[in-house]
Image (cartoon, helix red, strand yellow):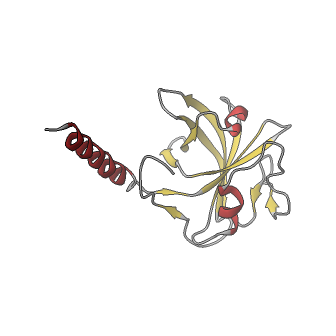
């Protein structure tokens, strides 16, 4: 087999592999983290329930994200579920936030007792505490957080995200 043919077959195989990986469904969420002095917010798509008892979720966050600087075992986070078809929250957080930018400026927010602020337009929220952090030879770190409290804010379905290619967002 010639080198160009082998290279084309390898590229086609990777493309198909990427499309297959992109079929793993995820949602879209707003993640809030704070160290008491700074609050950072990001759009997260790799959030998944990880256990029933205690209730835990897993969140994959790109290595080097500013929000990661606020996360350690014991840190509090909030996960807000974006409603299906919502473009306001998605547009606001999809581009990312500057380090000194007020993440909730001009927005209606709720602050559950003892918890972190969440957008009032969210479908639901979870207040959590980081219990484990896994760094491995990857471009993302994996955080496991125990859910301490949560509530439904509105009826509806969550925003579902299906990527066309599993090698990028």
Picture residue at 31% right of the left edge, 48% below the top: 17
Picture residue at 55% right of the left edge, 70% below the top: 157
The answer to whether 63 is drawn above or below residue 90 in the figure is: above
On the image, the x and y values in percent for residue 6 come to 21, 40
On the image, the x and y values in percent for residue 137 come to 47, 26
Front residue (pair 145, 9): 9
Front residue (pair 14, 55): 14
On the image, the x and y values in percent for residue 117 come to 78, 52
On the image, the x and y values in percent for residue 74 come to 69, 31
**Quadrant location, the N terminus:** top left
**Residue 93 lies in quadrant:** bottom right
**Residue 35 lies in quadrant:** top right
Q: Is residue 41 left or right of residue 134?
A: right
Picture residue at 28% right of the left edge, 49% below the top: 12
Picture residue at 84% right of the left edge, 51% below the top: 102
Give the farthest residue toward the left: 1
Front residue (pair 55, 16): 16
């Amino acid at each position: 087999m010639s080198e160009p043919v082998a290279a084309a077959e390898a590229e086609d195989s990777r493309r198909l592999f990427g499309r297959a990986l992109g079929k793993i469904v995820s949602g879209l969420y707003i993640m809030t983290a704070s160290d008491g002095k700074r609050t950072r917010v990001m759009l997260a798509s790799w959030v998944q329930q990880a256990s029933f008892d205690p209730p835990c979720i897993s969140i994959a966050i790109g290595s080097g994200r500013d929000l990661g600087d606020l996360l350690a075992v014991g840190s509090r986070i909030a996960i807000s579920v974006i409603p299906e078809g919502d473009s306001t929250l998605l547009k606001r957080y999809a581009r990312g936030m500057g380090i000194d930018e007020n993440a909730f400026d001009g927005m209606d927010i709720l602050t559950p007792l003892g918890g972190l602020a969440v957008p009032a337009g969210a479908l639901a929220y979870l207040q959590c505490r980081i219990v484990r952090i896994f760094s491995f030879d990857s471009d993302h770190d994996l955080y496991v957080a125990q859910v301490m409290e949560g509530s439904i804010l509105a009826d509806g379905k969550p925003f579902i995200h299906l990527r066309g290619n599993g090698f990028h967002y």
